[in-house]
Image (tube, rainbow, N blue to C red):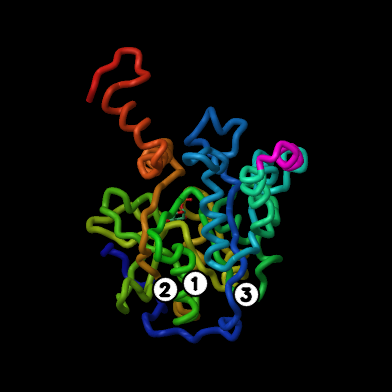
Amino acid sequence: MTSMSPAPGFSSASAPVPDYACARVTKCLFPVAGLGTRFLPVTKEIAKEMLPLVNRPVISYGVEEAIESGCPDIIMITGRTKRSIEDYFDSSFELETLLKTRQKIDLYEKIHKISSMANVLYVRQSEPLGLGHAIAKGEPFCRGEYFGVILPDDVFITEDGVQPVLAQLIDTHDKLGGTVVALERVPPSEASRYGVIQSEAVGDGVHRIIDMVEKPSAVTEDALAIMGRYVLSPSIFPLLARERPSVGGEIQLTDSIRRLIGSEPVWGVEYKGRRFDCGTQKGWLAANVALALEDADLLPVVVDTVKKGVGSKDPKPL
Ligand code: G1P
């Protein structure tokens, strides 16, 4: 645990569940306005969410997760350099006509599915004022209902038979009501990269959250950190509207979720699955290698390249 103590006036007792808790979660926000500076220069012209993860863009993993979790209504909080995301999820009339004319029906169906599998709306975040500011832009679409949030840099892969991670959170929301965040236990050296929680375990990987802090500096033990999946109460919007910039000079979502604690239930779920951090070059490369190793066609390519030095200037087997 971290050295945090519960915020003044915060109680760990179960808070009342608001009336609108019964409706199904069908909408999901995707904040995608970030400039991707960690990937420069490639992200000077290409949205980081459109970088390939094996054979499709990173963002398509998150969109499929939302759909499989029962959220076909997707709202992208986007920015000036992100037009390629809109084009990707739009239909491509010329390409689809060409594929049909050439009888490439399998490929046509694959391409057609991209634009037909979800209802995708776009809203601009004109200034990069932080995650909390981005989520606030979703208010006109989610007013009065619980909604999902997917940070698409965090790619989650679940085994066959295991629910997608957003669905795991929705499941907890359906059972317990309230806001839910995805959690992963991280070592102290990594805690400062995340929102970190203090909690009481209630069993089966579920935690009642007592407090949370964004990017803590002095963590001495393993900590439960928030990963990029949320089910949020619409009560978050008036809190975000009043939120002041904090860590990094940005309006932090974590600060507003913290304000919910005590007036509404806030839970954390240690998700089941594997996470790849595609928000850094190293994490993105590792994700590509790991997923290529699970593809029968690509596995020998990766193994040959690494072990035999195939393609290198000066082949040196490892
Ligand atoms: C954001 C959130 C942070 C969370 C992290 C997960 O941080 O603010 O609480 O732990 O996503 O990836 P960011 O990565 O935008 O700095």
**Residue ID for mark 2:** 267
Which of the two residues, 295 or 217, is positioned nearer the viewer here?
Answer: 295
Q: Where is residue 260 in the image (x, y as percent from the top left)?
A: 50, 74
Residue 170 falls inside the magenta stretch: no
Q: Give the range drawn in magenta.
A: 96-104
Which is more N-terminal, label 2 or label 1?
1
Lateral position of residue 252 relative to residue 275, left or right: right
**Residue at image coords 25%, 18%:** 316
Q: In this view, does 16 lie above or below 195?
A: below
Q: What residue type is labelled 1?
A: Ile
**Residue ID for mark 1:** 170
Quarter that holds the C terminus = top left
The answer to whether residue 282 shows anywhere in this view is: no
Name the image quarter holding residue 239: bottom right
Q: Where is residue 60 in the image (x, y as percent from the top left)?
A: 56, 49
Q: Is residue 129 above or below residue 286?
A: below
Which of the two residues, 160 or 15, is positioned nearer the viewer here?
Answer: 160
**Residue ID for mark 3:** 145
Which is more N-terminal, label 2 or label 3?
3
